[in-house]
Amino acid sequence: MWSLRAWRRQRIIARHPVSPEQWQAVLQQLPILDGLDAAEQQRLRERAVLFLQHKHLSAMPGVALDGHDRLILAVQAELPLLHLADLNWYQNFHEIVLYPDDFVSPQRHRDASGVVHEWDAAHSGEAWQHGAVILAWPGVLASGQWHAYNLVIHELAHTLDMLNGDANGLPPLHSTMHVEQWAKAMQSAFDQLNAELDANPNADTAIDPYAAENSAEFFAVTSEYFFSAPDLLVKAFPVVYAQLALFYRQDPLARLQQLHANNPNYQSRRTRPACATNG
């Protein structure tokens, strides 16, 4: 059956083609796309084109974006949605603001006793409900490897989380999933991580300790690991990996394992990022 919306989508894709050379440059820069089959690559390429037509990228002074840069960002933004139905998952924002470096942002927190604390903190990314997503461009450029860091996925995971309201680590789950199972898996792992840090604040935790900040950051950090270090995540918190696999409807671990099986020389970097996104 003919659909005006589908026709418009195809028209946009036809008007903004990505050449084989452009796509090869993207694949070369983003190893986390390794192992995607031809159909997945085609879907990802098309969704990246649509993303760039629907979202405005605002580069602050000091950031120069060319077509390749824009495509690199859009592809990483769309990777988590690759196997999800097109339901406007990123409806909560219309603009991404790119800073040339980490930025200072005022923070405000009311503690359990009702006391309000205010301070300034350096961030490499922020996402607000119905507001712009802010990213430090060096963090975007550092993303896309198998090294447990992806600023784009981290911040856009927050926007998925906020589809249900305030960020609380519970995005809208599919009808085939169970909130109780999600909550049990996430809370147990969150508590385990916090207990380890309570015992030793300098502990070399299995995943970025920033995940212990709150439930929202735990979801964002584990989403980040799900796509950029699935082997580390499944080793630390297998039930969390299983829930994220159900939510994103992907299995990056199987893809990474297949890459290693097919090519013993395949390298997956394991460098912990210098700082968390703080966003």
Image: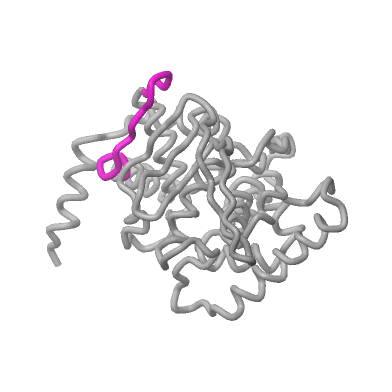
Q: Is residue 56 magenta?
A: yes
Label total for image: 0
**Looking at the picture, does residue 162 appear above or below residue 11?**
below
Residue found at x 42% / y 32% = 98
Tell me if 219 is positioned left or right of 193 in this view. left
Query: Which residue is more in the foreground, 250 or 173?
Result: 173
Q: Quadrant of the N terminus?
A: bottom left
Name the residue furthest right.
Answer: 199
Residue 118 pos. (x, y %): 56, 47
Horizontally, is 203 left or right of 151 in the view? right
Residue drawn at x 34%, y 55% is: 92
> Residue at coordinates 65% horizontally, 45% vertically from top-left?
259
Magenta residue check for 217: no
Does residue 214 sit above or below 40 in this rendering?
A: below
Q: x and y percent of residue 184 in the render? A: 66, 76
Q: Relative to 262, does residue 184 appear above or below in the rendering?
A: below
Residue 50: x and y, percent? 28, 45
Image coordinates of residue 265 in percent, x first then y, are: 73, 34
In magenta, the rendered stretch is 51-65
Residues 139 and 83: in front is 139
User: Could you say which quadrant of the image residue 25 lies in?
Assistant: top left
Front residue of this view, candidates 72 and 210 = 210
Residue at the spot 65% in from the left edge and 48% down from the top edge = 256
Q: Nearer the viewer, residue 201 or 3?
A: 201
Q: Quadrant of residue 268?
A: top right
